[in-house]
Image (spheres, rainbow, N blue to C red):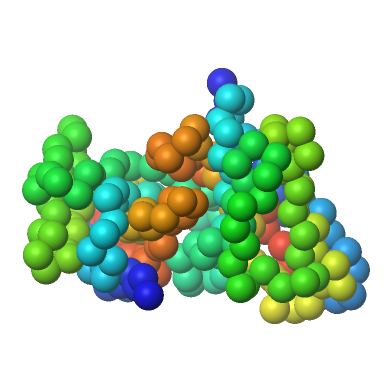
């Protein structure tokens, strides 16, 4: 079955780069997503990558996909205190429903 | 468009009571998903609708849970005879076809 794993916690200093890692198991996933969740709030879509791509850049965000190792990463350049949140990676199931399978989330703490 | 909305945002109830949550998707989105997120975990799929048809239900959706989308627009999720283990954030997402899922702010349920 599908399983998505992430490290629990990451702490960085303001201005540094953050790299959040994710591994997934469903090799048939066509889309992989990164969502951000602030305390008590819903999920905000940050970016996504199609499985035939290796990299996608969107302003301060860079997504890297290693399909062979089923490894996904999100790099945030020039991390700000406002980036402190929980980040979830998700794979889109390649069945009729296309529901998402999420990792457990990585809590990013940005220190001033 | 104002995005996906959910009501109420918070619900506190006593064990054994029934509760109902509402989700209003982005207009013209034909698919609507319900997810449940317990504390410290990623969201887990519960069920989804394409227009008014409920097409898939997770095994997490016990017989105390029922969801409807009568006119293919808003959806309701009802939990009967609530238990403490039902305490969670209930998230709704919508999409058009197999596109990106956009999430609402969630309804946080606390069962005392």
Label tally = 0
x and y, in percent, of residue A82 in the image: 34, 45
Nearest to the observer: residue A75 or residue B64: B64
In this view, B28 is above or below B12: above
Quarter residue A68 falls in? bottom left
Residue furthest out toward the right: B17
Q: Residue at x 68, y 45 (%)?
A: B53
Looking at the image, residue B75 sits to the left or right of residue B93; the answer is: right
x and y, in percent, of residue A108 in the image: 31, 60
Q: Residue at x 41, y 37 (%)?
A: B99
In this view, A108 is above or below B49: below
In this view, B86 is above or below A47: below
Looking at the image, residue A55 sits to the left or right of residue B46; the answer is: left
Looking at the image, residue B17 sits to the left or right of residue B98; the answer is: right
Looking at the image, residue B40 sits to the left or right of residue B25; the answer is: left
Q: Residue at x 37, y 49 (%)?
A: A35
- The answer to whether one can see residue B92 in this image is no
Nearest to the observer: residue A85 or residue A110: A85
Q: Quadrant of the N terminus of chain A?
A: bottom left
Q: Residue at x 72, y 62 (%)?
A: B109
- The answer to whether one can see residue B19 in this image is yes
Quarter residue B38 falls in? bottom right
x and y, in percent, of residue B9 in the image: 70, 48
x and y, in percent, of residue A98 in the image: 44, 51
């Amino acid at each position: 079955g599908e399983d998505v794993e992430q490290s629990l916690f990451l702490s960085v200093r303001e201005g540094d780069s953050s790299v959040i890692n994710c591994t997934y198991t469903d090799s048939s996933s066509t889309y992989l997503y990164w969502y951000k969740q602030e305390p008590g709030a819903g999920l905000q879509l940050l970016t996504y990558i199609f499985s035939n791509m290796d990299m996608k850049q969107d302003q301060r965000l860079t997504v890297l996909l290693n399909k062979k190792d089923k490894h996904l990463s999100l790099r945030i350049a020039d991390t700000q205190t406002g980036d402190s949140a929980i980040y979830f990676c998700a794979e889109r199931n390649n069945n009729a429903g296309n529901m998402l399978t999420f990792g457990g989330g990585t809590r990013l703490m940005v220190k001033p | 468009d104002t995005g996906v909305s959910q009501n109420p945002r918070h619900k506190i109830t006593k064990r054994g009571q029934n509760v109902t949550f509402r989700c209003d998707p982005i207009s013209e989105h034909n698919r609507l998903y319900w997810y449940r997120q317990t504390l410290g975990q990623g969201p887990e799929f519960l069920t989804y609708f394409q227009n008014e048809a409920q097409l898939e239900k997770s095994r997490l959706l016990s017989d105390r849970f029922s969801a409807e989308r009568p006119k293919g627009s808003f959806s309701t999720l009802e939990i009967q005879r609530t238990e403490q283990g039902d305490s969670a954030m209930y998230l709704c997402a919508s999409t058009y076809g197999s596109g990106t899922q956009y999430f609402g702010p969630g309804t946080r349920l606390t069962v005392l």
